[in-house]
Amino acid sequence: MTGQVRPSAGIGDAAPPKRRLLWRYPIALAVIAIFGLLLGSDLPPEVRRAVSGFGQMLGALAVSAACMYRYRLSTGRRRHAWLFFAIAGLFGSAGAVGLWAAEPSGAGDPTSPANAFITLALLSGVAGIVLYPSVPRRLTEMIRIVLDGVVLGGSVLYIASLTVFPQILANTSTPYPQRLLPLASPVVEIVIATVAALLYWRAAPADRTSLGLAAIGFALYAVSATALAVETAQGDFMLGSITDLGWIAGHVTLALGISLARVEPRNTERKELSPVLGTFVMFGLFLAAGIVNLLATAGDSYVAAGVLWLIVLLAVAGRQIFIILDNERLRRDLEIRVAERTSALNTANERNILLLNSVGDGIYGVDRTGLITFVNPAAAHALGFGSTELIGRDAHALFHAPLPDGSPAPIEGCYITEAIRQRVVTSAEDDLYTRADGLQIPVEVTATPLIEEDSVTGAVVVFRDVTQRREVDRMKSEFVSMVSHELRTPLTSIRGALGLLSGGALGPLAPNAGRMVDIALESSDRLTRLINDILDIERIEAGVVSMKLAFHPIAELISTATSQVQLLAEQSEIAISVDAAPARVFVDADRVVQTLVNLVGNAIKFSPNQTTVWIEALERGTFVEVAIHDQGRGIPEGKLEEIFARFQQVDSSDARAKGGSGLGLAISRSLVERLGGRIWAENNPAGGATFRFTLPTEADFPSAEDVTVPVEPRTRRVGTV
């Protein structure tokens, strides 16, 4: 329906991609070439007149049709503007028909009806330009555009006034005012082409194609209009000459530009093509006009041309003065903004320094070579140095305590080196720092690489003295261990007595009494497992448990673990699928199997019947990543980290419904981290959860295949950035 906006176009959408519109260019060139060949051929004058008239009419109708297409896709003032442009195309088509139908001798008469239609077309086009909504511009920008237009258009008009216009004014038999009438059309076309060129120069990149084609089209109009005026003044105008090709080519080019215009530009940002190039173009035309001025001779039009030349000179001078003043204003504004930004940066820097100095944790930064670049007072105080003493010194050699055998700590495995070279983020690593007085203090370290423009410039290290916390943990562990041992002795007696009662040592029990004994026996077993788990995790974290490290195929460890939970899986109707890479890990086999049994057992317990638990092991550089996927209910996002704490479960009812003490994941994390790996949980997009942990594939003792070492924390690598 006419007047409605097509939903498929969508007001505000950009025009189709240019690569889908490239076919329009060869068609436009082909049409122009065909009419050029016909008008430049030796065909009879009547035929060429018909070709010229038909081409101009067809081109004007094409412009009108393109404007009507934009009219249907637009709204508001933009819609009304396109309507006036379409009407201008219809008037232009009517003018072409009038020229075609006129007598050859009178076709160039400025007072002919054809020229009246062309004048109406120009007026309709001006109305469309007035109605077309423009992007708001600054006053200084508008002044510069006007001055550029005066220089550009004035230079072209001045050159024409000394070279072409005298030929139009040469017929002295006609009154001077009447001789000026043929100049109206070329002057108007030159002005419009100048405006289009200026808009092209300062338009958004997406609009330059359509505006550039419009400028070319109006320039072609100006060429033909000037030729028409010259031939009319000389009395030898004849429709159908090659000069008419400018009208036809102008129509085709303008229609092409309109068809490529955006419907409703979303982005109104403008970007000047090149201020330097624009200045060269302006002064190039001005210089050309000056050369023509030197070569020209005085004539009837020389006085008027002199006035125009004076206007251009004043515009050039005004343009340069205005640019100087505008640049000076911009310079002052820039100085003010730089001063404001400098003040803001200084304020932010002072605030950051205040925050850095007020933090209780030690913080220091290093450059790409590991030399200290800054240190906060807390770090200097904890290490027993003055703040200025640390700047420029090697952090690794200065802080890191030597190995138990007295040799320096290797720099290759240092978290600072890994942060700088490999962009590894290290979190919560336990380390020993040596103070200035030689005292060694336990610290917890976090290291993060500093990245600027995708290049590592250094690292920031945050550390905390955990001496008091270690002492509190030791006292707590001793207390828990003592309580657990004290509970185990009477619990063993209770467990033995209940076993005797359940076995009938004192005779058969009544059914109700037997059930009570079974419940008590099951509860005592559960309490025994809980105490054993508590003792196990305390021994691991206290470092009193030794691990027998050796190379083991990860597939064999997974096979051993799955065989231990196979009965539980069969009872729950759960299938276990394994996909393990042929890699070896340097671990304690029993502890890895214990971790796998905990994780796979949890996956089985929390998976619906007749589902599958997948186990996969993949090589990730110097680590093997093991993943256990289930199809259960998943884990709330807020508890993905909490579930690794002691006595933590997803739901408090799980302890009653599923059993367990809530220590399995805590034990698994302690074991994995002591082996130098990392463990975490995540939810699957399709449902269920995945538990992942990493194990090292490179030995810490490459000279031995089988090593027994105490449980010591390894580097906890979080990831890379």
Image (spheres, grey):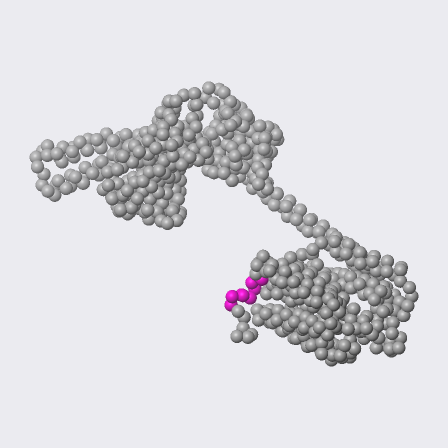
In the image, taking residue 87 as reference, residue 519 lies left or right, namely left
Where residue 406 sits in the image (x, y, percent)?
Answer: 48, 19
Farthest residue to the left: give it.
507
Where residue 487 sits in the image (x, y, percent)?
Answer: 25, 32
Where residue 204 sits in the image (x, y, percent)?
Answer: 65, 59
Which residue occupies 10% across, 32% down? 505
Which residue occupies 27% across, 37% down? 565
Residue 374 shows in this picture: yes
Count up the numbered dots.
Answer: 0
Q: Nearer the viewer, residue 548 or 657?
A: 548
Q: Quadrant of residue 136?
A: bottom right
Which residue occupies 16% across, 35% down? 498
The segment highlighted magenta reads: 7-15
Question: Can you say whether 205 is above or below 353 in the image?
Answer: below
Q: Quadrant of residue 535?
A: top left
In the image, taking residue 213 as reference, residue 603 lies left or right, namely left
Question: Can you say whether 48 is above or below 410 in the image?
Answer: below
Farthest residue to the top: give it.
405
Residue 246 shows in this picture: no
Residue 693 sits inside the magenta stretch: no
Where residue 709 sits in the image (x, y, percent)?
Answer: 39, 24
Q: Nearer the viewer, residue 452 or 347?
A: 452
Which residue occupies 57% across, 69% down? 73
Question: Can you say whether 285 is above or below 97 in the image?
Answer: above
Q: Main secondary structure of the magenta part?
A: loop
